Image (cartoon, grey):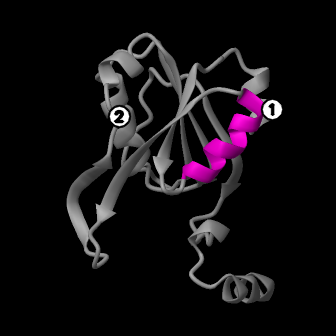
């Protein structure tokens, strides 16, 4: 993915990492891009794993009007599944007049999306295209040995 970004005409000023899944990919991209990372948190489930009617912002930018306006932002998450989270974040970011916003995800699931990618987003970078299967990321594991065992069975 870092090669896709480097070979494109998009030169980001900063990354906005969607927590918690986007934190690690953003940090890895930072090794190559050498730009600051700002983090945001969006929740679609409460502490009892009950779906919310709309996304809940658990962490947002301190001063978005000065952090985003006129900047080229790379929005980073681990997966583009339903696009609900990415779409919500894009809508929020565009309220603050960035120069440009691009999206980077490790995995894109080949399935219908709940949110259409805005025409203003000219660059979408992804590592792999996948079927609509559950992905177990190492950073989400409660028990890393169990996760390794399950991965080896697949």
**Residue 47: x and y, percent?**
29, 74
Nearer the viewer's eye, disc 2 or disc 1?
2
Element on which disc 2 rests = loop
Q: Does residue 68 show up?
A: no
Element on which disc 1 rests = helix
Q: Which mark is residue 61?
A: 2
- Please say whether residue 52 is one of the residues in the magenta stretch: no
Q: Quadrant of residue 34?
A: top right
In which quadrant will I find the C terminus?
Answer: bottom right
Q: Main secondary structure of the magenta part?
A: helix
Q: In which quarter of the image is residue 89?
A: top left
Q: Does residue 28 show up?
A: yes
- Please say whether residue 27 is one of the residues in the magenta stretch: yes
Q: In this view, does 134 lie above or below 154?
A: above
Q: Is residue 130 above or below residue 125?
A: below
**Of 89 and 129, which appears nearest the observer?**
89
**Badge count:** 2
**Residue 49: x and y, percent?**
31, 76
CA distance for labels 2 and 1: 28 Å
In magenta, the rendered stretch is 22-33
**Residue 40: x and y, percent?**
40, 44
* Left or right relative to 49: residue 74: right
Residue placed furthest toward the front: 62
Q: Mark 1 points at which residue?
A: 3
Among the two numbered marks 2 and 1 on one chain, the one whose residue lies closer to the N terminus: 1
* Left or right relative to 85: residue 125: right
- Residue at screen point 35% across, 16% down: 66
**Residue 73: x and y, percent?**
51, 24
């Amino acid at each position: 993915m870092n090669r896709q970004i480097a070979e494109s005409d998009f030169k980001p000023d900063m990354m906005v990492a969607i927590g918690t899944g986007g934190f690690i990919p953003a940090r890895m991209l930072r090794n190559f891009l050498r730009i600051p990372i700002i983090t945001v948190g969006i929740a679609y489930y409460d502490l009892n794993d009950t779906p919310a009617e709309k996304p809940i912002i658990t962490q947002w930018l301190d001063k978005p009007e000065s952090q985003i306006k006129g900047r080229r932002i790379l929005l980073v998450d681990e997966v583009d599944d339903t696009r609900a989270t990415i779409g919500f974040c894009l809508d929020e970011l565009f309220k603050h007049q960035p120069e440009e916003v691009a999206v980077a995800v490790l995995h894109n699931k080949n399935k219908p999306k709940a949110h259409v990618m805005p025409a203003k987003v000219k660059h979408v970078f992804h590592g792999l295209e996948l079927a609509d299967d559950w992905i177990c990321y190492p950073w989400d594991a409660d028990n890393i040995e169990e996760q390794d065992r399950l991965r080896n069975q697949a």
